[in-house]
Amino acid sequence: MDTSSSSLPNVKGNIFGQKPALFVLFFTEMWERFSYYGMRVLLVVFLVKVAFGDSPWDRADALALYGIYTGFVYFTPMIGGIIADKYIGYRKAVLAGALIMTLGHASMALEIDWAFYLGLLLLIIGNGLFKPNISSIVGQLYDKEPELKDGAYTIFYMGINAGAFLGIMLCSYYGESADWGYSYGFGLAGIFMLIGLIQFFFAQGIFGRIGLAPSELQAYDDGVAAANAIEPDGAILDGNLAKGLATEELPEVSHGDGQEGPRAIRWAIIGTAIAAVVYFLIVAFMEPQANALQTFSRQFMPPIIIGAVIAFVGWIVSDKSLLKVERDRVWSIIVFSFFIVFFWWAFEQAGGSMTIFALDYTDRTLDAGSAGTFRIANTLLTVVPVMVLTYVLLKLFSITFKHYSVANLVLALAFVIVWILIGIMLYEQFTTTEPEVPAGWFQIFNSLFIICFAPAFAKLWEKKISWLKRGPVKFAMGLILLGIGFAILAVGALSIPEGAKTAQVSMFWLIAAYLFHTLGELCISPVGLSYVSKLAPVRLIGLMFGVFFVANFIANFAAGLTGSYIEPIADEIGLSGFFLIFAAVPITAGLVFIAISGWMKKMMHGID
């Protein structure tokens, strides 16, 4: 059943020309990304410095676990998309995912080995329900205005990165600080995930019928919802609005070929057989691994990925109910997803090998002179973006507070907590004689640059520039810019001797690399989300977002796996050569994507 609708509750006003409902999703996603990136920035550092009171982990083991975790975080969305599409709807999926992730962060804050692994598992499950479905709601807000989708997703992407910025900054500071500790860092991630859950629950009525479960939509269509519809904060919906929702005409859409079960079983068998063949080939030609973690990462995960992806893609494209245009567009989403693997494979070195570079190879100790400069710069970097976010919050208040007061008050409390945490952090930094920059601090530049440049990119995509209207060209630009960022990092690492375990390289190289990585990300990620929402058949939109995130699953796992070889590769060709690999591959992929852009345009059947 079609879950889109133009019949949103009559909340007058806009924020930067966009619907207030977009900013409810903006803040929900912001707190979820706070929790994800806040935890992620600590994961590798925690393992290689502290672990669970035993000996710290080797770099290879820490990066292997990082790859497994971040990979599965993007594997479960394809399952979460199916569950939401067919059973519980996007809203309930978002709420369930947020609750499960809150419990996961709470488990990790205990710093006990079994609770730590349980927390990672809960985060993987929760993210699978949350991630594809909140993106689906954004797309359906603009079903009637497809020309605004690229801009809306770019604004939404600002929310993602505002959360990442705050999470990285605060969790890194409090987690890596000797005066606080990792429990505080992991705990903060859980607190703000809970805030996002509460805020979304009490503001969800602003979406009208968008995101409801199929059974709830049927109730609206039958007129039952006119008597039972509940608006946030417990108020009864306006009668005229409820009747309008209940009687709205919906287009008839197909729900599949009626053979989902047998087709799924057939492709599951095919995928399993392929995985088994790949596994035996790996075992036959690869040396035995040092431990169970390395064995799972290097021998079991690749077959699982290859078999699962082939089975999943085969199951989708073999659906006989897909029309030719639909099938071609589904294939175009798959091609987009294939090329985005190269982007995230390199980009996700930020939480792995680039964190190791910041931790062991970057000069982070500040003397009296540089400490003063750092304090002023860090204050500006911290305070100005949070002031901008506070302004956006006040704009949302002015439009929605009357109807969604509880949600707004929860958001206000969250910002009060953020300002208090920032105040404590800045006070401690100004009263420390020679502060050391946390290794995770450098990752804030990605989010900071996104917040700064996203509005400009949103305007750029709206301009009538013919070659910029083509999605493959935007993707290629992103891949090439990412490669340039790693080329800069490779130049910065030239002074590090082969096999060196530590060095004192200038901070400049990391910051410059993050700038180009961010410019590339703005060309790929929000645009990619927008294209999935445009190209996917309505009945499969959650599922196709799941496909898109499967690409992140492959890339994140591959990023951790490749990063786990940092020491042997650096011993052979130097750390500069290691990073040069991540420059060459994305640039090559970008050039190939430009070459096939004409074919992609045909496959998209009129979607710019």
Image (cartoon, rainbow, N blue to C red):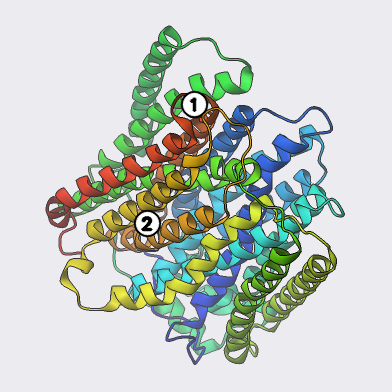
- Secondary element at tag 2: helix
Q: Residue furthest right?
A: 179
Instruction: Report how far apart the C-alphas of labels 2 and 1 lie in the structure.
Output: 27 Å
Q: Can residue 242 be seen? A: yes
Q: Which amino acid does label 1 sit on?
A: Met
Q: Which amino acid does label 2 sit on?
A: Ile
Q: Quickly name the residue at label 1.
A: 301
Location of residue 334 by image quarter: top left
Location of residue 415 by image quarter: bottom right
Residue in the image at 42% along x and 51% along y: 488
Q: In this view, does 256 lie to the left or right of 30?
A: left
Q: Do the residues under discs 2 and 1 have CB atoms within 8 angstroms?
A: no
Q: In this view, does 195 lie to the left or right of 537?
A: right
Residue 604 placed where, x, y %?
19, 57
- Residue closer to the observer: 209 or 295: 295
Residue 522 placed where, x, y %?
40, 63
- Residue closer to the observer: 548 or 288: 288
Which numbered dot is residue 541? 2
Q: Residue furthest top?
A: 284
Q: Is residue 209 left or right of residue 103?
A: left
- Secondary element at tag 1: helix
Residue 570 placed where, x, y %?
50, 29
Residue in the image at 57% along x and 47% along y: 505
Please rate how many residues cluster around mark 1, counting C-alpha atoms within 10 Å: few if below 14, some from 14 to 19, many from 20.
many
Q: How many marks?
A: 2
